[in-house]
Amino acid sequence: MIRVNQAGEYGAAQIYKGQLAVMGDDGPDSSAIHHMAEQEQRHLDAFDRMIVERNVRPTLLQPFWQVAGYALGAGTAMMGPRAAMACTAAVETEIDLHYQGQLEQLASEDEPVLLSKIAEFREEELQHKQTAIDSGAEDVPGYPVLSAVIRLGCKLAIGLSKRI
């Protein structure tokens, strides 16, 4: 759990870096993206600490997630601010499902710290999704297709990070 969550938070941080590199600090949703990026960095910092404390091997795919996350963020931002938010909505939809599954699994295990962190982070991820929807994510032409492709990519990234 810790390996895949660290990889996911790392990828999310890269997505926001890519979006901000394209949109700049004066874009219509830049302040919201900065806020979400700060929260993702806090999540990443927490999982980075857990990786060290629990002696968990990080995914070997991290260099790939750096490039893929940044490219996804920059690419959707180039399509416009609502497309950038569509990316966030799609990613957070998958992360919600992923974290919910982990919470269900942890409910029967003696891992109160991990359970608490994942629950806290899941709530913030749901806020990110709502921010994206409120910012017009679902109004992007072709949103169902864009969302489905991004969600599939997230599922693949989760599966690969669990194994590699």
Image (cartoon, helix red, strand yellow):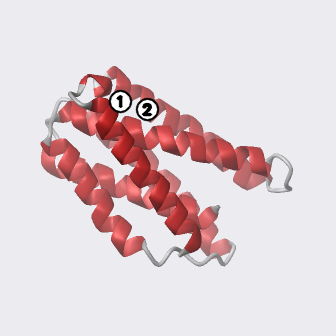
Q: How many labels does the image show?
A: 2
Circle 2/circle 1 CB separation < 8 Å: yes
Q: Mark 2: few, some, or many residues within 10 Å (few <14, many ≥20)?
A: many
Tell me residue 137's x, y (percent).
30, 28
Disc 2 residue type (three-letter)? Lys
The answer to whether one can see residue 9 in this image is: yes
Tell me residue 146's x, y (percent).
29, 39
* Residue 150 relative to residue 83: left or right: right
Tell me residue 100's x, y (percent).
65, 41
* Residue 148 relative to residue 70: left or right: right
Q: Mark 1: few, some, or many residues within 10 Å (few <14, many ≥20)?
A: many
Up-down relation of residue 73 to residue 128 (above or below)? below
Residue at 81% across / 46% down in the picture? Answer: 107
Farthest front residue in view: 145
The quarter of the picture where residue 139 lies is top left
User: In the rendered image, which residue does mark 2 sit on?
Assistant: 129
* Residue 17 relative to residue 43: left or right: left
Which numbered marker is on residue 56?
none
Q: Quick one: SS at disc 2?
A: helix
Residue at 19% across / 43% down in the picture? Answer: 77
Up-down relation of residue 65 to residue 77 (above or below)? below
Disc 1 residue type (three-letter)? Ala
Which numbered marker is on residue 132?
1
Tell me residue 94's x, y (percent).
50, 43
The answer to whether one can see residue 20 in this image is: no
- In this rendered view, identify the residue nearer to me: 124 or 109: 109
Up-down relation of residue 96 to residue 164 (above or below)? above
Separation (CA) of disc 2 from disc 1: 5 Å
Q: Quadrant of the N terminus?
A: bottom right
